[in-house]
Amino acid sequence: MADHRADGDPTPRLGRGPIGEEPVGIVGGGSWGTALAHLIGGNDHPVLHWMRDAATVAEVNGHHTNTKYLPGLTLSPRVAATAELARIGQECRLILLVVPSQSLRSVTAVLGDHLDGGHVLIHGVKGFEQGTFKRMTTIVREETCVRKIGVLSGPNLAREVAEGQPSATVIASKYPEVIERARAVLAGPTFRVYGNTDVVGTEVGGALKNILAIASGMAVGLGFGDNTKALLLTRGLVEIARLGGHLGARSSTFSGLSGIGDLMATCFSPLSRNFQVGQRLARGESLDEIIAAMNQVAEGVKTTRAVHEYALANGVYMPITEGVFRILYDGVAPRKALASLMDISRYVYEIDPEFSGGAAD
Amino acid sequence: MAAKGPTEAAVELAINDVAFHEIARLETDRGKAARLKEWVDLYRTLGRRGADEKARLLGEITRGYASDIVGNFDPRVYRFATSVIPRGLRLLFRNQLADAGPLGLEQRITVQGHVADLKTLVQRGTVILVPTHSSNLDSIVIGFALDRLGLPPFTYGAGKNLFSNWLISFFMQNLGAYKVDRRLKNGLYKDVLKTYSTVILERGYHSLFFPGGTRSRSGGIERKLKLGLLGTGLAAFINNLRAGKPNPNIYVVPMTINYPLVLEGATQIDDLLKAMGKSRYIIEDDEFTKLGRMLTYAGSVLGFDGRMFLHIGQPMDPFGNLVDAEGRSIDPRGRPIDLRKYVEVDGEARHDAKRDAEYTRELGEAIGEAFMRYNVATTTQMAAFVLFEMVKARHPDLDIYHLVRLPGDTALPLHEVAAGLARLRDRLLLEAAAGRIQLSPTVQGETIERIMEVALRYFRMYHTRDLVHIEGERVLLNDMKLLYYYHNRLAGYGFERIFEPVPADRAEAPARG
């Protein structure tokens, strides 16, 4: 007889492979990838960490440090680095993808040759693909045969997580196994892992907060205080939820860790790269100068363009994104863009339903 | 069984659920007072009955459902029927339908697409054919077409009400159709139905599922699919792996059917408009149950060079991956996929309700996209789309309800309609070249005048009044509801934008909140 009893079985049976000494794969040697490797190694799981740069591979394996991205930190001895992407697919079943949004497609296209339907892929990439406006899980789906895909997102400043400060993150996936397997290696005394099934909302929240981080940095750079920042964040969250609703996200996701949580951490922290971009723009530096001076990618710069173009083409009203776009790409002075945002004649708001609780429309 | 059977509480819950749904259903039916009383008595006394009694009751209900679904299906009769019935079917079509026109039915059904792949795959595994569904004629037309292609027959679940037409019932029962009673909403019935479907797939009987569940009432391509029955493909695949069968593969083949006119179009769209916002109801009696109406339809649709278009899409696996000509699953980058890995836990193929539901949801999405891609645009759909969108553009303040209730003398200038058709055709050619839709030969290759002529001829033929007629320089629209129905077949491709009035303030920045 067909086994349909499984339908009524309330306890999900997890497809957990033999844990033993199988390492967790991490793809991407930036600060967040390094922090995750260190965290998982600290939980006493072996980690195989892929990075492009051979010198960094040697440094991690020889000295347990990554001075470029997390200077001063001694990495867990359970982290081994490699420059061979194939090894990640061959040796690891659970793989975290932590590369810049515009590299994810090329990296997964190569990695895809070494993957099968039993692999679990979780990305921690906050952005959209330029030109196509595709989400990162869509890219993973298009470049591999893997279905057990998830997203990791939350208020996680890499250095604070690496230092073991109490933090939490969200893993979103339609497959319970993805959440459980990630939790099994990530959760520990200083790190909580929450599950969510709203993949779209989790990805949108993580990507769009970078735009607001730039705006927030600008407000601080212009010398404004907490009122202004609170205004930006509150209206910004409405804007995020509006786009999220348009893309099929659940509005409740935006009031969680991966929504407002991530927004607060990024916009209040001078550690955030996107915040720094905004702050320096406000002080009169040009975007090219700022980018040239940073050794890490500020995702918000590209996300702003992608989101602005999508919103324009699809009639989604996103005034803050538009303002940031004009500053970044049209050379409009931050002070002028802000004045335009505050211009009362632009608004028709006798009653604004979005303020009183409703998020997405 | 006794040792590892379900708990008493689970048995009671299952019976309770059946009783609850049966009482709710029978309460609205005056003629079923006795049955109602039985269920009410059972419902009230269930808690006091012993464990053995409950188990016996559950078994009895389950067996009742199973025998109702299976009907008198018998493998021996099936084998006999599959060799004899197609001949009878051809006879039926020749005598009853095809004689109405100059061409036989065979010439009227155009089958295109991945026909060769389908022929290969019925040898390599078990095939689930998933067509779009707009008419009860679909299963007959498909059955006929499959036979002409030299394919074995496909079993399928047909609404129980259809068995009331004796002629149809005769063919359906003998071709392995099983009965689906859509009035039964309880979980147990659905489980029995799914189990039946899983078992016949495991035993290698190719099946036909209409994944939209019922006929598309809007006339549009189904985008929201019923996943319950669809999931039995994956269940059967996993069972086949567990049993170590040599050909465990289940293939899912999407297919579209397009008619120039749809037999039940008028009732379907009426039902949709009535039921929107209210609870759904099932029409037990429509054009299909009346033989006379069917023959009028056949006579008019087949009266001249009318054609039906069947387009067979690229096969997929139960996970929604594409399958190549050899029956191998391939990923979006063309790499072969080992399907076993999707369902293995510790090296063994296993069921997992939540995971499998998600796989099936992804399959449903892939089928929905395939339906759009393999939809064949016909002249009537094209004309209805242009006419409806042009009227909509003239009444930007009206919603669908008001649009379909516009008075019968709504008119459009003929030359504007022709220009609209030309614009839509240009877009259709582009989309077809990009593989996003298919076109009928007339839509593909004839002049705009010819397309309009063919469409208008159809529109005068079958439905109780002419949908459209031309008076001098004016095109008069007599039935907005039916135009909406045929229009919907081309909805969802973004063609609406061709007819949108250009707002005066488009040049302005997107200000205002």
Image: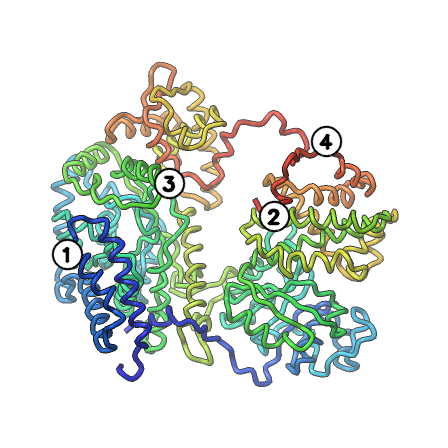
Q: Which mark is residue A345?
A: 4
> Is the Cβ of the residue at disc 1 closer than 8 Å to that at disc 4?
no
Q: Tell me the kind of residue under disc 1.
A: Ala
Label 2 crowd bin: few (<14), some (14–19), many (20+), radius 10 Å:
few
Q: Which residue is mark 1?
A: B34
Marks 2 and 1: CB-CB under 8 Å? no
Q: Residue at x 44, y 55 (%)?
A: B366
Pointer 3 and pointer 1 on the same chain: yes
Q: Earlier in the sequence, mark 2 or mark 4?
A: 4
The residue singled out by tag 2 in the image is A357
For the N terminus of chain B, give its image quadrant: bottom left
Query: Disc 4 and disc 3: Cα gap in Å?
Result: 40 Å
Q: A40 above or below A200?
A: below
Q: Residue B311: x percent and y percent?
A: 34, 48
Query: Regarding mark 3 in the picture, which secondary structure is present there?
Result: loop
Residue A81 quadrant: bottom right
Q: Disc 3 marks which amino acid?
A: Met
Check the picture and name the quadrant holding the C terminus of chain B.
Answer: top right
